[in-house]
Image: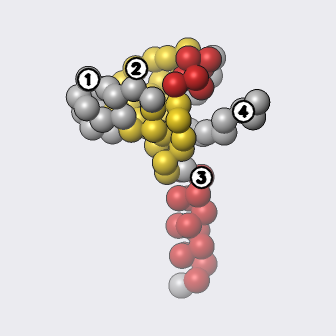
Amino acid sequence: MERKSFGLGDIVLMKKNHPCGSNEMEIIRMGMDIRIKCVGCKHSVLVPRAKFEKNMRKVIHSAASAGEEAADTQNQS
């Protein structure tokens, strides 16, 4: 099984909704545990990495690609 790739600052889609109704979370801390922040209500939760990887569906918006896009637009100017 392929490991899911995600990084600091990424917006990810989770399997279950947060109580506020949003299922989009931003990764704000990585290590053995991962701290995620709800995009809807800004509440943060500390989740063990194994549980996070199991409950994450996909990366919606990658912070790394956003940084590359910003650098590309600056270089074109």
**Looking at the image, which residue is at 36% across and 34% down?**
23
Cβ–Cβ under 8 Å for marks 3 and 1: no
**Looking at the image, which residue is at 58% across and 57% down?**
65
Q: Give the number of the mark in front: 3 or 1.
A: 1
User: At numbered mark 1, what does the secondary structure look like: helix, strand or loop?
Assistant: loop
Mark sitting earlier along the chain (3/1): 1
- Name above or below for residue 23 compared with residue 68: above
Q: Which residue is mark 3?
A: 64
Can you give x and y, in whole percent of width and height, for residue 56 in the image?
53, 31
In depth, the one of 49 and 28 nearer the eye is: 49
Mark sitting earlier along the chain (4/2): 4
User: At numbered mark 2, what does the secondary structure look like: helix, strand or loop?
Assistant: strand
Q: Can residue 25 be seen by looking at this rendering? A: yes
- Name above or below for residue 69 compared with residue 33: below
11 displayed left or right of 65: left
Q: Amino acid at mark 4?
A: Arg
User: At numbered mark 4, what does the secondary structure look like: helix, strand or loop?
Assistant: loop
**Looking at the image, which residue is at 40% across and 20% down?**
45
Q: Quick one: quadrant of the N terminus? A: top right
Q: Can residue 9 be seen by looking at this rendering? A: no
Distance between the alpha carbons at the discs numbered 2 and 1: 12 Å
Q: Which residue is mark 2?
A: 45
Distance between the alpha carbons at the discs numbered 1 and 4: 28 Å
Q: Give the number of the mark in front: 3 or 4.
A: 4
Cβ–Cβ under 8 Å for marks 1 and 4: no
Q: Which residue is mark 4?
A: 3
Q: Amino acid at mark 1?
A: Pro
Q: Which residue is mark 1?
A: 19
Distance between the alpha carbons at the discs numbered 4 and 2: 22 Å
